[in-house]
Image (tube, grey):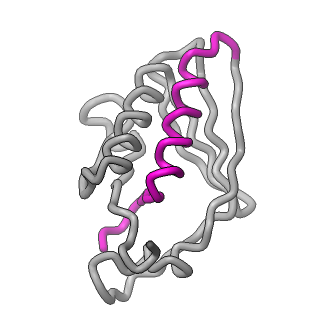
Amino acid sequence: MYAGWHCTADQRGCNDMAGLADLLADDQWPAHRTISLIDPVTVGADRIFGAHDLRVEQFEKLRLQNCPDDESASTLSWADGGITLTLGRPWLAELARALRDVASGDADFAVRFGEKGSAAAPRISFWWWPKTAL
């Protein structure tokens, strides 16, 4: 397991999230949606590659928001048990592509949402949905 941000969902969850990213990318006004997240331990998503000693920090909510005035927007912040991912139109499209890849069984990759070479750009690893959760 690698330190950092990780994302997985079953096929339906990936497709629903990709559709949400598409809707936000198409919106010309600032908008957001908040979704509940499940504890990764309950489906084995914290142990995709076996046992490890990394601390898994789980958040209860994800707020996905667009930034139609700034296409390069790409921030990830957290507070009060929730995370907020703010993305400009191209990055929302990239998120939708990544989620559709996971839904189709293509996973084990990472995307850096932001300017190439920027250490501040959020990096998210995308993984298969655990077979034990099926």
Count the marks: how many? 0
Q: Magenta segment, which residues?
A: 1-29
Q: Where is residue 52 in the image (x, y as percent from the top left)?
A: 33, 86
Which quarter of the rendering shows the N terminus? bottom left
Foreground residue among 14 and 50? 14
Is residue 64 shown above or below 9? above
Picture quarter containing residue 114? Answer: top left
Find the residue positioned furthest to the right.
80
Q: Where is residue 74 in the image (x, y as percent from the top left)?
A: 48, 32
Q: Where is residue 29 in the image (x, y as percent from the top left)?
A: 69, 13
Report the residue at 60% width, 25% height from top.
24
Residue 52 is a magenta residue: no
Is residue 18 shown above or below 79? above
Which quarter of the rendering shows the C terminus? bottom left
Q: Position of residue 116 (x, y in %)?
A: 26, 31
Report the residue at 63% width, 32% height from top.
65
Report the residue at 32% width, 36% height from top.
118
